[in-house]
Image (cartoon, rainbow, N blue to C red):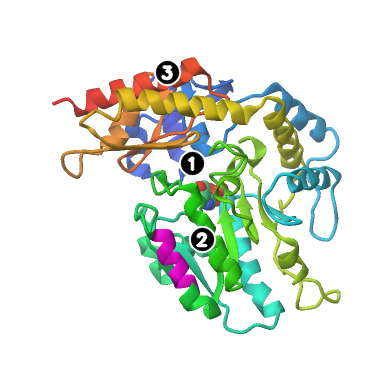
């Protein structure tokens, strides 16, 4: 057994990988990472892979960014963690102040958690209690979109559209009103009509602004979202924007809501918040939502919810430095330039291939939908495996190959990713 095989076997013996069939885990040539350098992940045999999925959409500036490493080490020299339940922490305050300057939410307040799903869960519970605290009865349901993905806890799974083999949990999911998915051009119009019709029973509308990521990068034009915000405002329904995937520069602006002209009552952030370093997420509440929870000490107006690692100080220190670096390095300009380059290369090289159905791109969120001649060919998985063989780490969503490079990706790296993708598609689709 070579070193790699030994690590895979030790791995499969004790680690249970998410969204992964463990019976075939070892057969699918998993990469076992030991360390990283910039854009590259390096495995236990020293083989390098260009990380073109940003470690499942979380890494923004690359791996082992010296400035972020330093922020982490400095904070470790102060305190790693102290609870936010009833007490404060200096670096968390500084982070919340810095975020408050940039999130598209009015006078925002931050309830921190560790995962995107928990941020969504918190938003759902806050929206529910908001109406109870205001003494309004009947506002107990949610409107969500087809194709939506909001995480894997039972509440976030309920507003999500299902699929990914999670239908088994349908009996546990609470019912919601379901607008069409983003692939339907009229989905926002339908959602607006549903808000009008059902406003008196709606606690909130939940939406991924601009891009439904896990649905395979389904896009809606930025201009179409204003009508949804207006309907929510007109009918006094809370708007929850799930920016867990789209936040922190992914779509070309710091938040997708900016392009869409949305100012959410509740916003969920996660993934890129710490540059991909540490698990941290947050539910961002507007002043109006936050103030509905004010009342006497220990009263029933309190939000009785909180996680052990809410506002972890190490994560906060990294997130704070990360936010500064996005500005200092003008990362958004790179996102826009590399996005334009990626679009033109894909248009020229990949979109015309008969094995490709559609290319969808917004900023540096990209889905290349393959067109297998019949079911069961596992083209998505096989194309990505062929790319991994060539040293570019990709991972599919079904038959959609996801391209999610770091926001600091270079011109040469974008060219390499497209070259390798085109070769991989060729290899799998040629008879
Ligand atoms: C990934 C994702 C989540 C869930 O985040 P986790 O950190 O994986 O729990 C929620 N919403 C969207 C839009 C996501 O892409």
- Looking at the rendered structure, the secondary structure element under dot 3 is helix
**Residue 153 seen in this snapshot:** no
Q: Are marks 3 and 1 in contact (CB under 8 Å)?
A: no
Question: Could you tell me which residue is drawn at 77 percent across and 37 percent down?
Answer: 317
- Residue 239 image position (x, y, % from top left): 59, 63
- Residue 402 image position (x, y, % from top left): 40, 36
Of the image marks 1 and 2, the number of the one nearer the N terminus: 1
Of the image marks 3 and 1, the number of the one nearer the N terminus: 1
Residue matched to label 1: 15
Q: Is residue 193 magenta?
A: yes
- Residue 345 image position (x, y, % from top left): 38, 23
Q: Quadrant of residue 129?
A: bottom right
Disc assigned to residue 86:
none
Q: What crowding class fits label 2: few (fewer than 14 Cα within 10 Å), some (14-19), or many (20 or more)?
A: some
Q: Is residue 382 magenta?
A: no
Residue matched to label 2: 227
Q: Quadrant of the C terminus?
A: top left
**Of marks 1 and 2, the one in the foreground:** 2
In the image, farthest residue toward the left: 431
Residue matched to label 3: 415
- Decide which of 41, 218 is in the foreground and name it: 218
Q: Quadrant of residue 292?
A: bottom right
Q: Quadrant of the N terminus?
A: top left
| Gap between marks 3 and 2 measured at Cα | 38 Å
Of the image marks 3 and 2, the number of the one nearer the N terminus: 2
| Gap between marks 1 and 2 measured at Cα | 46 Å
- Looking at the rendered structure, the secondary structure element under dot 1 is loop
Q: What crowding class fits label 3: few (fewer than 14 Cα within 10 Å), some (14-19), or many (20 or more)?
A: some
The part of the chain drawn in magenta is 187-195
């Amino acid at each position: 057994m070579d070193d790699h095989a030994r690590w895979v076997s030790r791995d499969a013996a004790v680690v249970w990988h998410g969204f992964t069939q463990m019976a075939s885990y070892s057969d699918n040539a998993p990469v076992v990472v030991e360390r990283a350098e910039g854009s590259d992940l390096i495995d236990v045999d020293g083989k390098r892979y260009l990380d073109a999925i940003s470690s499942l959409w979380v890494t923004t500036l690359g791996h082992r960014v010296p400035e972020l490493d330093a922020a982490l080490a400095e904070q470790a020299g102060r305190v790693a963690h102290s609870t936010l339940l009833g007490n404060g922490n200096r670096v968390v305050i500084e982070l919340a102040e810095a975020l408050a300057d940039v999130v598209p939410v009015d006078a925002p307040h931050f309830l921190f958690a560790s995962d995107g799903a928990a941020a969504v869960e918190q938003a759902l519970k806050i929206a529910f209690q908001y109406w109870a605290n205001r003494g309004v009865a009947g506002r107990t349901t949610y409107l969500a979109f087809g194709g939506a993905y909001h995480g894997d806890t039972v509440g976030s799974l309920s507003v999500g559209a299902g699929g990914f083999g999670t239908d088994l949990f349908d009996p546990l999911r609470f019912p919601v009103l379901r607008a069409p998915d983003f692939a339907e051009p009229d989905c926002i119009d339908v959602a607006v009509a549903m808000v009008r019709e059902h406003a008196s029973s709606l606690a909130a509308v939940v939406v991924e602004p601009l891009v439904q990521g896990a649905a395979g990068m389904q896009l809606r034009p930025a201009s179409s979202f204003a009508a949804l915000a207006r309907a929510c405002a007109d009918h006094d329904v809370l708007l929850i924007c799930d920016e867990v995937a789209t936040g922190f520069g992914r779509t070309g602006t710091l938040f997708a809501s900016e392009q869409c002209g949305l100012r959410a009552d509740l916003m969920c952030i996660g993934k890129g918040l710490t540059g991909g370093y540490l698990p941290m997420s947050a539910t961002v509440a507007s002043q109006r939502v936050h103030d509905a929870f004010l009342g006497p000490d220990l009263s029933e107006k309190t939000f009785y919810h909180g996680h052990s690692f809410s506002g972890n100080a190490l994560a906060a220190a990294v997130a704070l430095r990360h936010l500064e670096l996005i500005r200092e390095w003008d990362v958004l300009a790179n996102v826009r330039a590399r996005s334009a380059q990626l679009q033109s290369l894909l248009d020229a090289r990949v979109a015309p291939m008969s094995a490709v159905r559609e290319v969808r791109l917004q900023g540096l969120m990209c889905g290349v939908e393959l067109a297998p001649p019949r079911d069961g060919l596992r083209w998505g998985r096989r194309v990505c495996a062929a790319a991994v063989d060539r040293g570019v780490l990709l991972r599919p969503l079904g038959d959609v190959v996801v391209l999610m490079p770091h926001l600091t990706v270079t011109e040469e790296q974008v060219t390499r990713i497209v070259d390798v993708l085109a070769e991989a598609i060729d290899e799998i689709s040629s008879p």
